[in-house]
Image (tube, rainbow, N blue to C red):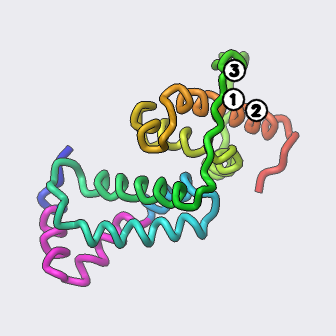
């Protein structure tokens, strides 16, 4: 999907240095981009750092936007890239190579899955180990393919797939525990 005429006009005004237009662009996308950042990072403070750094890059690189996608998709890619860079620079991010795929294969739900609210699901995802959480979000939420994830994180495609399967298994266990009252929610 390409940028709309209204988006192009807003970008033109931003590039002309009009503060109102720059604020409008920021205000229009900050909520969605914060949600993207908080899914990637371990804390709200880190997500806010990513958001600030990401929007700085957006305004510095705005002249490179070619309109081949929506501005929101372009901004989101910058936020995701900034989050990944932030994780790599901290040298905290680790993906554990797992060779035991058999233990992590998908299990079919034996009974109808209960519905949880978005906040409960968000907290359950945030509690996943960092490598699992990052791969899970990049694949399921951001729509990246395992090959892209592997390249972005400097891991193998197999590791990406394994981390995703492990994340699903851990998330399923966490949510099942919530269903039966075994775990507390925040």
Residue highlighted by disc 1: 169
Dot 3 crowding, Cα within 10 Å, few <14, some 14–19, many 20+: few
Against 73, residue 174 (above or below) is: above
Q: Is residue 75 above or below residue 102?
A: below
Comparing labels 3 and 2, the label whose residue is closer to the camera: 3
Q: Is residue 117 visible?
A: no
The residue that disc 3 covers is: 100
Which segment did they paint magenta? 8-30
Q: Is residue 47 above or below residue 129?
A: below
Q: CA distance from mark 2 to mark 1?
A: 6 Å
Tally of numbered tags: 3
Residue 91 spot, x, y in % from top left:
59, 56
Local secondary structure at mark 3: loop
Q: Of helix, strand and loop, which one carries label 2? A: helix
Which residue lies at the image location 66% right of the left edge and 28% below the top edge?
98
User: Where residue 56 appears, x then y in whole percent?
Assistant: 35, 72
Is label 1 or label 3 in front? 3
3D distance between C-alphas at marks 3 and 2: 18 Å
Q: Which label is found at residue 19?
A: none
Name the image quarter holding residue 175.
top right
Up/down of 117 relative to 143, above or below: below
């Amino acid at each position: 999907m390409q940028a709309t005429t209204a988006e192009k006009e807003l970008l033109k005004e931003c590039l002309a240095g009009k503060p109102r237009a720059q604020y409008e662009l920021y205000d229009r996308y900050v909520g969605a981009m914060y949600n993207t950042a908080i899914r990637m990072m371990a804390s709200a403070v880190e997500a806010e750092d990513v958001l600030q750094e990401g929007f700085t890059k957006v305004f510095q690189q705005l002249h490179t936007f070619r309109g081949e996608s929506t501005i929101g998709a372009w901004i989101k890619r910058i936020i995701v890239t900034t989050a990944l860079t932030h994780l790599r620079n901290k040298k905290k991010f680790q993906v554990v190579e797992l060779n035991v795929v058999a233990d992590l294969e998908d299990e079919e739900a034996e009974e109808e899955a209960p519905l949880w609210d978005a906040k409960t699901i968000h907290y359950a995802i945030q509690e996943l180990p960092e490598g699992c959480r990052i791969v899970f979000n990049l694949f399921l939420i951001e729509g990246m393919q395992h090959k892209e994830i592997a390249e972005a994180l400097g891991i193998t495609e197999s590791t990406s797939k394994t981390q995703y399967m492990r994340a699903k298994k851990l998330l399923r266990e966490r949510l099942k525990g919530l269903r039966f009252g075994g775990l507390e929610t925040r």
